[in-house]
Image (tube, rainbow, N blue to C red):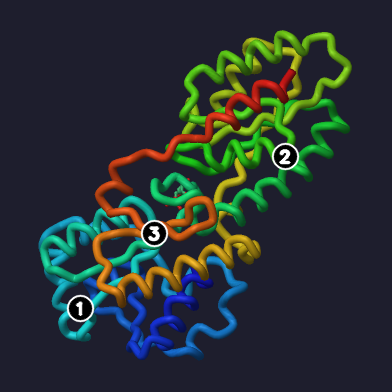
Amino acid sequence: MNACIRAVVRTAIYNNLEIAGIMRGYDGMISDDIISLNSESVANIIQRGGTILKSSRSEEFKTKEGRKKAFETIEKHGIDGLICIGGNGTYTGAGIFYEEFGIPAIGVPGTIDNDLFGTDFTIGYDTAINTAMEAIDKIRDTADSHNRVFLVEVMGRDTGFIAIAVGIAGGAEVILVPEDQKDEKKLYQIFTKKKGRKKSFSIIVVAEGEHGGAVTIASKLKKKFPDLDIRTTILGHIQRGGSPSARDRILATRLGVSAVERLVEGGKNECVGMINNKIHFTSFKEAVEKRKPLPDYIMGMIDKLSV
Ligand code: F6P
């Protein structure tokens, strides 16, 4: 997100615009927590995880009164347009705010889950999958030495984008995602087939939103196969931090630059995305309503690799 903020600030300045930073997202808009930004304010942040502007999930912005207060702040500071980095909630809020108060906004997809329609990739996804993959590489050493089965839970409340990427890159035998309700059955079939085979260690990647997560799946697996030595690792928020990958920094920069240019050209009520390496714009409505499916070819490939 910092790489994006840097790109937004510098592109705005390049276009002779004044630019301010709203702290903690919509909460800062409500409580008038606005800072002025210049080129130096965003120096030396491209390599830092998180966001210098901080973040929050604002409950108050969901109310009409909250949004009214936010509009008072916007008016007070003479703000003419917004660039909002976030996911579905951020886009929904920006869309309603435009309808109510006419403040144009361009959304930028920022979530490690990569589950936003209108873009192939979201900011943070690449860094998160690389972090999780490195963790799996380390877990493999114990799995192999001790002949254990490891269930590694990755983030993805409603979706398996992180799980499929991490599972493939980390050489997992099974990947469990919320999108595939039959995958739990496949897991048991694979372990039935595996019985008596020489290699007995396994890495199973589980998306957190899948059938109660890794802990639940581990206890079901143990009941069916009591001889297995099973361990569970929940990677959690380590996936949401750390220095961003080069791919994420480049994506964030391209999206940030394009978001400002679009706003300057009169764009509103839409989000920027990257499809087939080209910049695309999608209305907030479409981005929020449509669900981005997991790529089919990946799902088919997983079955082939677990033989
Ligand atoms: O942003 C989505 C997400 O990364 C989910 O995958 C995860 O469930 C959630 O964030 C965790 O959010 P929090 O930090 O609020 O617990």
Residue at x 35% of width, y 74% of height: 23
Using the rendered view, name the quadrant where residue 273 is placed.
bottom left
Residue at x 65% of width, y 17% of height: 222
Q: Amino acid at mark 1?
A: Ile
Please name the residue that numbered disc 3 is placed on: 86
Q: Earlier in the sequence, mark 2 or mark 3?
A: 3
Please name the residue that numbered disc 1 is placed on: 74
Using the rendered view, name the quadrant where residue 148 is placed.
top right
> In whole angstroms, how far apart are the C-alphas of marks 1 and 2?
46 Å
191 and 13: which is toward the camera: 13
Q: x%, y% of residue 252? A: 51, 66
Please name the residue that numbered disc 2 is placed on: 170
Q: Earlier in the sequence, mark 1 or mark 3?
A: 1
Q: Amino acid at mark 3?
A: Gly
Horizontal relation, residue 35 to residue 307: left or right? left
Are circles 1 and 2 on residues that touch, CB within 8 Å? Answer: no
196 and 146: which is toward the camera: 196
Q: x%, y% of residue 32? A: 24, 79
